[in-house]
C-alpha cells in the first residue's frame, strides 16, 4: 500500500529529529481525533497534528476559514482545543512539497492568506528543529 503524502512529509521531518527525542505516532482507528504524534522531552511534551496540501492555493484564505475545505475534522479540532485548555503544548503542522508551516497552540483557528502561508514556510529540517526546541532545549 502506498504511503499517504501526509505520512511521507511527516517521516521527512522525523529524519531530522535527534534519535534521543522520544516520539510516538498516535493514530488509532478506535480513538479518532487524537493528534498524529506525541513528542516527549526533558523540557516538555508536544502533540502535533500533521496535514498536507499538495499545492498552496493562490486565492482566498487557505486555512480554517474556508467552509468548503475542512483541513481538521471536528473531532481533531475538539481534541486539540481540549488539550490546549488543559495547558498542554499542541500544534498543527501543514506540509507542502515546498516545506511546512507551524501553527502552534490554537493559531490553526486563524485565517491565512496564501502570501502569509508562504511567508511562514519552513524546511523539514527547520520544522524538526522547532519540535526539538519545544521539547528538549
Image (cartoon, helix red, strand yellow):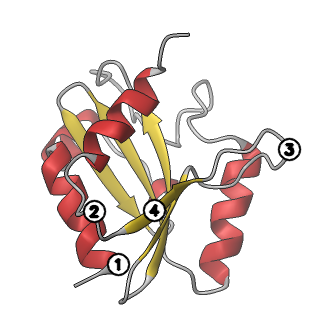
Position above or below: 39 against 27:
below
User: Residue beneath label 4, please?
Assistant: 23
Q: Residue furthest front?
A: 19
Question: Tag 2: Cα neighbours inside 10 Å, few (<14), some, or many (≥20)?
Answer: few
Work out whether mark 2 precedes mark 1 in sequence or the reverse, and give the earlier one.
Answer: 2
User: Residue beneath label 3, please?
Assistant: 30
Question: Tag 3: Cα neighbours inside 10 Å, few (<14), some, or many (≥20)?
Answer: few
Question: Tag 4: Cα neighbours inside 10 Å, few (<14), some, or many (≥20)?
Answer: some
Q: Position of residue 59 (x, y in %)?
A: 32, 23
- In this view of the protein, can residue 122 be seen by the observer? no
Of tags 2 and 1, the one toward the viewer is 2
- Determine which of the numbered discs, if any, sits on residue 135 in the image: 1
- In this view of the protein, can residue 116 be seen by the observer? yes
Of tags 2 and 4, the one toward the viewer is 2
Residue under the point 26% across and 34% down: 114
In the displayed structure, does residue 123 sit left or right of residue 95? left
Q: CA distance from mark 2 to mark 1?
A: 13 Å
The answer to the question of whether label 2 and label 4 lie on touching residues, with beta carbons closer than 8 A, is: no
The answer to the question of whether label 3 and label 2 lie on touching residues, with beta carbons closer than 8 A, is: no
In the displayed structure, does residue 30 sit left or right of residue 112? right
User: Residue beneath label 2, please?
Assistant: 19
Amino acid at each position: 500500500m502506498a504511503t499517504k503524502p501526509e505520512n511521507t512529509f511527516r517521516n521527512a521531518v522525523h529524519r531530522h529529529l535527534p534519535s534521543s527525542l522520544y516520539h510516538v505516532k498516535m493514530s488509532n482507528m478506535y480513538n479518532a481525533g487524537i493528534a498524529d504524534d506525541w513528542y516527549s522531552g526533558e523540557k516538555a511534551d508536544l502533540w502535533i497534528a500533521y496535514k498536507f496540501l499538495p499545492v498552496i492555493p493562490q486565492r482566498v484564505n487557505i486555512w480554517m476559514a474556508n467552509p468548503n475545505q475542512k483541513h481538521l475534522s471536528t473531532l481533531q479540532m475538539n481534541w486539540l482545543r481540549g488539550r490546549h485548555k488543559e495547558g498542554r503544548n499542541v500544534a498543527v503542522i501543514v506540509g507542502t512539497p515546498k516545506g511546512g508551516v507551524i501553527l502552534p497552540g490554537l493559531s490553526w483557528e486563524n485565517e491565512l492568506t496564501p502570501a502569509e502561508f508562504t511567508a511562514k514556510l519552513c524546511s523539514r529540517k527547520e520544522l524538526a528543529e522547532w519540535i526539538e526546541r519545544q521539547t528538549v532545549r
